[in-house]
Structure formats: structure tokens, C-alpha cells
Image (cartoon, rainbow, N blue to C red):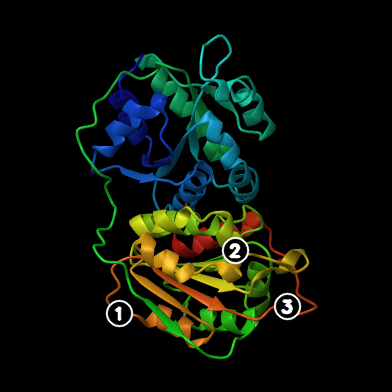
């Protein structure tokens, strides 16, 4: 058994100062220690996949030797499969995973861990994530972290430490609340604007007009959103998700928090937003003033054949307001985009939902640049790793 401080301080020496995750009783002393150190950054995620995507955003913007850790119970590993297989793996955005081993064979546990426990190592191996047991002796910590960082640096992919019960000695939580959460006594009133709906093409052109390359990063959701942005103007300050649906917003949050010198724009879609609604609360709580969330809502999964979504019955702007966004706009007037970017004295993340028409150019190309090259180009542009 080790002390939480022994691991966290050894990790800090190797650049790990960002943490995100969902608590597990095995992780309790570890999380408690991190929460009470104001020089470390901990984000409480709504689910494990959001934590992985958020740390990927931190890694994307790393302009010095900074690293991130995503923490989760193994029962939540399933929630993280999508970003681990189609985001971190695809773009080569490494991170350290700490995965607790509930239901470990030979160790009595609750019935819900009876299947996940035995298959946890197999799941990691299937996702091509090398793993080892979390260190339980002080002299094991440094070598384990060195193996992890060497692998991460040489491959650009995640490495996992699997934590058994009783690995870390208890550490009392003496602090209430969470660091970095923005106080918001009153929800931002939703501002609504009527007009004539435009196409995604017109909306994206307006986004480009508001996002100068020198100061802004644009992350586009998977599907036609990213492809159409690429077709209009493939700029070095843009990144196009090619999977991990719903992860553009937690990824943007990680980038915005770690790079306050940049304005970060998350281009979302209604289908993607519906998939990970919990992140609205995370963005409302932690979202900094340099984060912009624009949701283009056409009521359809257009890139897969135009099947309808249920967005027609969802008031995204009111949800954003209730979750703590500092600005919440809604409408079908393209002027909403200018209002979103031009608003002054906004102390927190800003949100707008723009209702758009369906329809996509028939000759819409797929990006010819690979995801790895898009990531590398963006990092070079913003002075990243």
C-alpha cells in the first residue's frame, strides 16, 4: 500500500498535473489528495468517456511538458471505449489511464462487477492499450510512471495502470466543493432570435469569418460538420473529429482550460449533443470565458441518410442556461453566430443553438489530410507538443 502523495508527487515530477474522471471507492484517497492541492487541476466528469476526451483536449494544447490522467472504475471503461478507440488512438493523443479493478478474479465484489472484472485486462488489450498493475510499493512508482511515459511519448497512445483494492492508503477529504467551478448564482436568460433558416454551409462560413487563425481553434464534430468545414477552407487552426461522436465538447473544454491564451470553438450537432447531454453540466460548471459552444441543429443524422433526431422536442439553450453557461442564445437567424462571438463581459462558457436547414453539397469531399496530420499541424500552429 502506498500513500496518495507518493504517487501524485512522482507523477507531478513527470508533468502530470491534469486529472479528470468519475470517482470509485478504490480511487477515493487519490482523488481526495488531488482535490485539495490547488496547483493540480481536477475536473469531475459526467462520464468516463468525457474524462478521456477532456484529457485528450489537454494533450492537444500542451505547449510544455504537461500531461493528463483519466481515472475511472472498470465498470465505466465501456463508456470510454468510443474516445479510446476513435479519438486518442486515431489522433495519437496519449494519456495515462487509472482503471480500478472491481470484480478482480478471486476477490469478492458486488454482482454488477462479476463480468467486467474478469474481462477488464482483455478489454484493454483489445483496444491495444498496454497495462500493468498500479504500484503498491513506493519504489515501484517511479519505474511504472517511466514505463508509461516512455510508451506514451514513443507511440502517442494511452497507457493504463489497473488499481487493485487497497492499493492506496486512506486520505481524508477536508475540503468541500470542487476547485475551478465557476460560481453562477443566476442562470443566464435565454435570448431568442427569429429569422430565416440557413444551410450548414452558410453557418460555417460565418464561423470562419469569426475565427481568426492567430487566436482561435475550431474543433468540428464528426460527420458532415467537419467535412463541410474542411471543404470550405482547410485551415491549420481547425480539427475535424472522425469518430467519438459527442466528444467534441469535452475535448474543447480540456483545450480551453489548459490554453487560456486561445479562444476555443466547439462546433456541435444535434445528434452528437444528444448522445452526451451530461457534458452540458460539466461545461456550465467549469467552462472558461474562452470557450464557445455552437450547436448547429438540423434535426437529422444527415451523414447517415437523414434519419430524424429527437432534437425537435429539446430546448438546448434552456438546458445550457440551467447548467450554468454564462450566455445562452437560440434562433434560426444566422446573426446568432455574430452575437455569440461578439458578446462582451461573458464570465464563462457561451452557447448558441442555431436551427439550420438540411442539405449538403453533393460533391462534399472527405479530408485528404489524415487525422494524425491534422493534429500535428494544429499543435505546431498553436505551439503545442
Residue 262 seen anywhere in this rendered image of the structure: no
Identify the residue at the far top of this view. 106
Taking 195 as reference, is 231 above or below it? Answer: above
Q: Which of marks 1 and 2 is nearer the N terminus?
A: 2
Indicate left or right for 232 with 329 as reference: right
Q: Badge 3: few (under 14), some or many (20 or more) residues near its Cα, within 10 Å? A: some
Q: How far apart are marks 1 and 3 (CA)?
A: 33 Å
Tell me if label 1 and label 2 are in contact, CB under 8 Å.
no
Q: Which SS class for mark 2?
A: loop
Q: Between 65 and 275, which is closer to the camera in this rendering?
A: 275
Taking 373 as reference, is 52 above or below it? Answer: above
Tag of residue 344: 1
Residue at left offset 23%, top offset 62%: 185
Residue 102 position, x and y percent, is 51, 22
Task: State which quadrant residue 216 falls in.
Answer: bottom left
Q: Name the residue under label 3.
A: 360
Q: Which SS class for mark 3?
A: loop
Residue at left offset 41%, top offset 79%: 341
Identify the residue at the far bottom of this view. 196
Tag of residue 255: none
Residue 71 position, x and y percent, is 45, 35
Q: Which SS class for mark 1?
A: loop
Q: Between 177 and 54, which is closer to the camera in this rendering?
A: 177
Q: Distance between the residues labelled 1 and 2?
A: 26 Å
Residue 221 seen anywhere in this rendered image of the structure: yes
Task: State which quadrant residue 258 falls in.
Answer: bottom left
Residue 252 position, x and y percent, is 47, 59
Tell me if label 3 and label 2 are in contact, CB under 8 Å.
no
Task: State which quadrant residue 132 falls in.
Answer: top right
Q: Mark 2 points at which residue?
A: 221
Q: Earlier in the sequence, mark 1 or mark 3?
A: 1
Amino acid at each position: 500500500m502506498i500513500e496518495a502523495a507518493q504517487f501524485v508527487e512522482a507523477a507531478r515530477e513527470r508533468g502530470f498535473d491534469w486529472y479528470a474522471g468519475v470517482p470509485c471507492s478504490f480511487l477515493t484517497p487519490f482523488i481526495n489528495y488531488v482535490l485539495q492541492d490547488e496547483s493540480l487541476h481536477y475536473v469531475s466528469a459526467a462520464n468516463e468517456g468525457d474524462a478521456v476526451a477532456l484529457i485528450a483536449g489537454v494533450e492537444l494544447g500542451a505547449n510544455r511538458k504537461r500531461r493528463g490522467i483519466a481515472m475511472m472504475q472498470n465498470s465505466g471503461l465501456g463508456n470510454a471505449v468510443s474516445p479510446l478507440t476513435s479519438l486518442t488512438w486515431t489522433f495519437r493523443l496519449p494519456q495515462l489511464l487509472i482503471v480500478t479493478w472491481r470484480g478482480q478474479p478471486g476477490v469478492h465484489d458486488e454482482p454488477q462487477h462479476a463480468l467486467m472484472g474478469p474481462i477488464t485486462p482483455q478489454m484493454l488489450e483489445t483496444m491495444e492499450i498496454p497495462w500493468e498493475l498500479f504500484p503498491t510499493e513506493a519504489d515501484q512508482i517511479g519505474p511504472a510512471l517511466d514505463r508509461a511515459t516512455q510508451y506514451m511519448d514513443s507511440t502517442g497512445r494511452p497507457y493504463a495502470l489497473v488499481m487493485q483494492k487497497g492499493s492506496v492508503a486512506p486520505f481524508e477529504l477536508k475540503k468541500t466543493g470542487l476547485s475551478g467551478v465557476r460560481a453562477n448564482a443566476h442562470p443566464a436568460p435565454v435570448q431568442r432570435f427569429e429569422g430565416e433558416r440557413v444551410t450548414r454551409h452558410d453557418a460555417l462560413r460565418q464561423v470562419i469569418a469569426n475565427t481568426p487563425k492567430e487566436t482561435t481553434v475550431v474543433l468540428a464534430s464528426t460527420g458532415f460538420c467537419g467535412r463541410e468545414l474542411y471543404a470550405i477552407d482547410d485551415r491549420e487552426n481547425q480539427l475535424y473529429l472522425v469518430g467519438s461522436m459527442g466528444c467534441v465538447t469535452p475535448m474543447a473544454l480540456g483545450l480551453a482550460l489548459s490554453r487560456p491564451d486561445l479562444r476555443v470553438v466547439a462546433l456541435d450537432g444535434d445528434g452528437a449533443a444528444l448522445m452526451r447531454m451530461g457534458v452540458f453540466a460539466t461545461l456550465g460548471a467549469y467552462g472558461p470565458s474562452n470557450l464557445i459552444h455552437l450547436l448547429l441543429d438540423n434535426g437529422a443524422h444527415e451523414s447517415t441518410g437523414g434519419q430524424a433526431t429527437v432534437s425537435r422536442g429539446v430546448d438546448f439553450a434552456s438546458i445550457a442556461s440551467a447548467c450554468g453557461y454564462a450566455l445562452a442564445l437560440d434562433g434560426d437567424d444566422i446573426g446568432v453566430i455574430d452575437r455569440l462571438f461578439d458578446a462582451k463581459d461573458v464570465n464563462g462558457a457561451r452557447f448558441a443553438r442555431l436551427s439550420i436547414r438540411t442539405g449538403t453539397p453533393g460533391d462534399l469531399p472527405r479530408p485528404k489530410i489524415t487525422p494524425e496530420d491534422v493534429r500535428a499541424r494544429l499543435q505546431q500552429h498553436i505551439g503545442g507538443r
